[in-house]
Each structure stands twice: as structure tokens, then as C-alpha cells.
Image (spheres, rainbow, N blue to C red):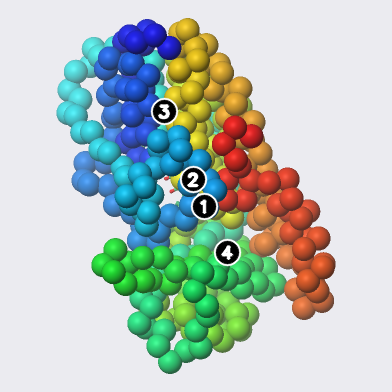
Amino acid sequence: MASGVVESVAVIGGSIAGCAAAVVLHRAGARRVVVHERATAELADRGVGVAVHTERCAELLAAGLVDEAVPWEPMRVLHWYVRDDADEERYAAVVGADGHASLVRGHLHPGLTPHSAGYPAWRGACPQERLRGLADWADGVCAYVVFDGGHLVVYRIPDGHGGRLVNWVLYATVPGTATTSRTLDAAHRARLDEITGELLPPFWGELIRRTGPDAVFLQRLYDVTAPRYASDRLLLLGDAATVARPHTGAGAVKALQDVAVLESSLAAAADWASAAAAYDAVRAPVGRAMTALGRRLGLGLVEATPDWHTQDAAALDAWWEELAGQGGFGGRGLGR
Ligand SMILES: Cc1cc2nc3c(=O)[nH]c(=O)nc-3n(C[C@H](O)[C@H](O)[C@H](O)COP(=O)(O)OP(=O)(O)OC[C@H]3O[C@@H](n4cnc5c(N)ncnc54)[C@H](O)[C@@H]3O)c2cc1C
């Protein structure tokens, strides 16, 4: 795209997708890129890490969207803060990188609402030292601990101070109760106690107990995908465009891939509208595929789990192939 074709772009949301979008818009020659982030304090992570699959990370490194120097935190987020007092500001285009509850998505698709998964995730990260005295498991293993009606995923992450945390996420239904906040209410505490005490193998139940009740939080789960990712003036990136359930393990990757495709679309197009159309043609189908994958995984791993005890290795392989065989677990390849 010729330098200066888009004079000015507003990016709504200054997290992963928003900041990456600002970078590529700048690279593509936009003369003025303003990131509007509503958070007034410094953005913080949730303390449970961001898992990025190696191949996807390599693609994003090659695309110049992940910094090699920070392998443990592959996204170095840039924050631009600007006081926005002026009512009369005008932009040629608006990029919605404003996350799962995107206002920009609401403008592009009025009435489109997220679809609740119907079950939550409990999350926590236990300092590794607290697990001393328990049987350990090998480095490099991501454990899927399954039970009737749910599963636990466990993997190690850095604690940011040279040590390690054992990060876990637990999915299960809580009959008759919806999740309304990050804090566990009585029903979600009781269900967690039941799962740790009666459904999980003792080691994994103990891991959750040793995390400590105050370090456990709830995540509401839902999915939504925008039928179109762009009009001639509005464009959606990351969770603003599509939220797929976290079983897919690909939200951050997807956000950065969106930005990578936006960059290549800008480079190949003569104007913003054609770049936006090209971007939409590539990324909207990926969003639909990831949402569908998240729902299939949710069904097989939480809502309608198989009889685990009668599954041999071949049956497990066939079952996984049916759920995830179409690809996308950990993120689809860039360009697919
Ligand atoms: C607990 C948890 C764990 C996760 N773990 C993983 C993982 O292991 N691997 C993975 O790939 N993904 C993971 N994800 C998903 C991943 O974090 C998201 O997919 C990713 O952050 C999406 O990036 P984004 O920039 O599109 O949206 P967000 O990160 O949600 O950023 C949106 C930004 O927009 C701002 N904003 C919203 N509305 C406005 C407004 N009106 N005006 C201005 N600013 C606004 C928000 O303050 C926010 O900073 C996890 C998510 C959660 C919640």
C-alpha cells in the first residue's frame, strides 16, 4: 500500500491485537495511528501465562510479531496512552482490538452476542516448591487429567523471578449455576472440592488444594465470531473478531496472526477498503473454524465425555482425531 493512503487510523483496545495492529499500520505507512486503551492503570497479566505453540510462535517470529529476546513472554506489549478530550476527532479507519466484549464489533454487527459455553474454567498457578513431597512428573509434559464431565490441564510456566509455577486450568459443569464473577461463590467452591476430592487422581487434587483457595479464580467461557471482520471503515482483530473457547489454546496466537495478515493485506492493496476486504477473506473463515473447534473440544472434553476407563490408546487416538483432526489445536497455520 502506498505510504499515506490511510492518513489516520484509530485502534480501539491496546492489548495484544491492538498494539500489534498499531505496529503494522505504522509499517504500512499510516501517518497517524492512535491506540485508545480504556484501562487507566498498567495492564497486567492474570498470572497464569500464555501458552503459544512452537510452530505458531515460529511463524509469528518470522512475521516480525514476536520478539525472540523474550521467549518466555513472547508478546512484548507496547502501550500508548493518550488523553482523549477532543470530541471532534475524525479517523479514516477504526481498528477494533478491544477484546471479547468489543464495542467495535457491536457497531459492525449490531445484535451479535457471545454464546455461553455453559460451564466455567477454574484457574490457578501453584509455586513449584509447594509440591515438594508429592510425586512429580517429567519436564516438558502437558498433563490432561480427565474425569466424567470435565478435565484438568496442567503445565509449568515461569514465575518471572527465575522459578516456576505449575499452571492449571480445570473445566467442568456446575449444574444449575452460571458464573458471574472471577471470585468463586459457594456453588463453585463446592464443585471444586468435589472434583479435587472425588474425581481427580489424588496427586492432581492435591496440586489444586496446595494452590490455595485465594489464588484460584473463575473464567467465564463463551464464544463468538464476527460474520465479517471488516467493512470499508471498521476492522476487527483478535478477540474483538472471534473468541474461541480456551480448549483451542490459541487466542493470543490468533490475535497476532490477524495482525500479520492485516500487514500483508495492507502491503498488497491499493487502498484501505481493498486491504480490509482481503483481510476479511482470509481471517473470517479461520475465526469460524476456531469457534467450531472450541465447541467440538468442549463437547468431547466437558459436556459429553467418553467412558475414559474403557478407552484404549487406539480408541483415544480415534476420538481425538474426530474432535481435533481438522486442525487448529494451538492455532491454525498462518495462511491456512
Ligand atoms: C485467564 C486467561 C488465560 C489465557 N491463556 C491463554 C493461553 O495460554 N494461550 C493463548 O493463546 N491465549 C490465552 N488466553 C486468551 C488471550 O489472552 C486472548 O485471546 C488475547 O488476550 C486476545 O488479545 P486481544 O488484544 O484481542 O484482546 P484483549 O487482550 O482482551 O485486549 C483488549 C484490550 O482492549 C481494551 N478495551 C476494551 N474495550 C475498550 C474500549 N471501549 N476502549 C479502549 N480500550 C478498550 C481492554 O482494556 C484491553 O486492554 C487467555 C485468556 C485468559 C482470560
Q: Are marks 3 and 2 in contact (CB under 8 Å)?
A: no
Q: Along the horizontal axis of the image, is 2 left or right of 111?
A: left
Please tell me which of labels 3 and 2 falls first in the chain.
2
Instruction: Pick the residue in front: 81 or 198.
Output: 81
* Type of amino acid at the residue the image marks with label 1: Thr
Residue under the image location 40 percent in, 36 percent down: 64
Above or below for 236 versus 133? above
| Structural distance between the alpha carbons of marks 1 and 3 | 27 Å
Q: Are marks 4 and 1 in contact (CB under 8 Å)?
A: no
The answer to whether residue 102 is seen in the rendering is: no
Q: Along the horizontal axis of the image, is 116 left or right of 272?
A: right
Q: Determine the quadrant in which ligand 1 lies.
A: top left
Q: Along the horizontal axis of the image, is 122 left or right of 151?
A: left
Residue under the image location 57 percent in, 36 percent down: 334
Q: Which residue is mark 2?
A: 58
Which marked residue is nearer to the observer: mark 2 or mark 4? 2
What secondary structure is found at the residue carrying circle 3?
A: strand
Quadrant of the frame with the N terminus:
top left
Above or below for 148 versus 100? below
Residue under the image location 47 percent in, 31 percent down: 260
Above or below for 22 versus 124? above
Q: Total of numbered circles in the picture? A: 4
Q: Identify the disc placed on residue 54.
A: 1
Q: Which residue is mark 4?
A: 171
Q: Which residue is mark 3?
A: 96
Please tell me which of labels 4 and 1 falls first in the chain.
1
In which quarter of the view is residue 98 placed?
top left
